[in-house]
Image (tube, helix red, strand yellow):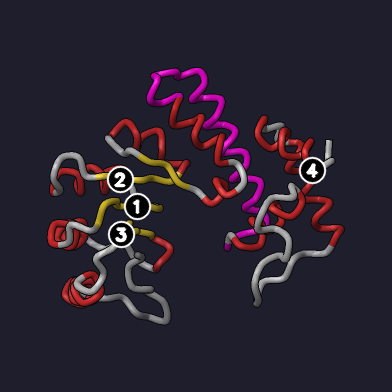
Amino acid sequence: MYTLAGWHGMKPTDEELFAYFDEVFSKIKHPIAFAVNHSMGYIPKVSVVAKICKKYSQIVTVKLTGVPDTYQIDLMDLLPQGQSFHVLVPASVTGLLLGADGVFGSESNFIPNTFRSYLDAYLNNNQAQMSITYAHLRRCGQFVNKWGPSNPRWLKMGMKILKLPGGEWGPRSPYKMPDQNELNKFTEGLLKLNIPEINVQAKKAGLL
């Protein structure tokens, strides 16, 4: 669950934001990941997020995107010990050291094992392997963002060329799958990353 979109001049007051989630979360009993994302147009106050999380126990994870590390520190100070935090790959080295227990990114749709390897390396205190897998994740993220900023386009491109489930029909409208020339550029660039998991998938797909 994301915060209210702060577009077209809309930026909720603290009271409006709390009232919104108070109404929504009171009707949802399913476990929830509460996402704080700067791309919504603003960053809610730590105190407001903490107040919401404390009131609704079904919030099992707080996902932080595009916020400074001090935001995580301040939020951890206000929430019970053991609260789950998930962070994006670029913020993950600091985030994990501060106590985050999950790392997320849209690239995990086609390189999930690389994400798993990264977290395993952290849990096993294998700094060398962590460094290698972090570099793989960052190179992949840097490359695919050329087809961003929204994710569906490049996600479906990757799934299609690697012949992964979900890539058969391309993205839903209004997105359109780029032409073959663009797919060829994407394929060439993706293979140049030399990420082991992508190489395995590319062999299965007949690209290598």
Residue 149, can we see it?
A: no
Say what amino acid the circle numbered 2 marks: Phe
The earlier-in-sequence mark between 4 and 3 is 3
Residue that mark 1 sits on? 63
Q: Are marks 1 and 2 in contact (CB under 8 Å)?
A: yes
- Density class for disc 1 (Cα within 10 Å; few <14, some 14-19, many ≥20) is many
The CA span between labels 2 and 3 is 12 Å
Q: Residue 159: say if magenta.
A: no
Residue that mark 3 sits on? 32
The earlier-in-sequence mark between 4 and 1 is 1
Q: Position of residue 137 (x, y in %)?
A: 56, 38
Q: Are marks 4 and 1 in contact (CB under 8 Å)?
A: no
The CA span between labels 4 and 2 is 36 Å
Q: Which residues are magenta?
A: 121-150
**Please, what secondary structure does the residue beneath circle 2 have?**
strand
Q: Residue at x 50, y 48 (%)?
A: 105
What mark, if any, has residue 205 been given in the picture?
Answer: 4
Quadrant housing the N terminus:
bottom left
The earlier-in-sequence mark between 4 and 2 is 2
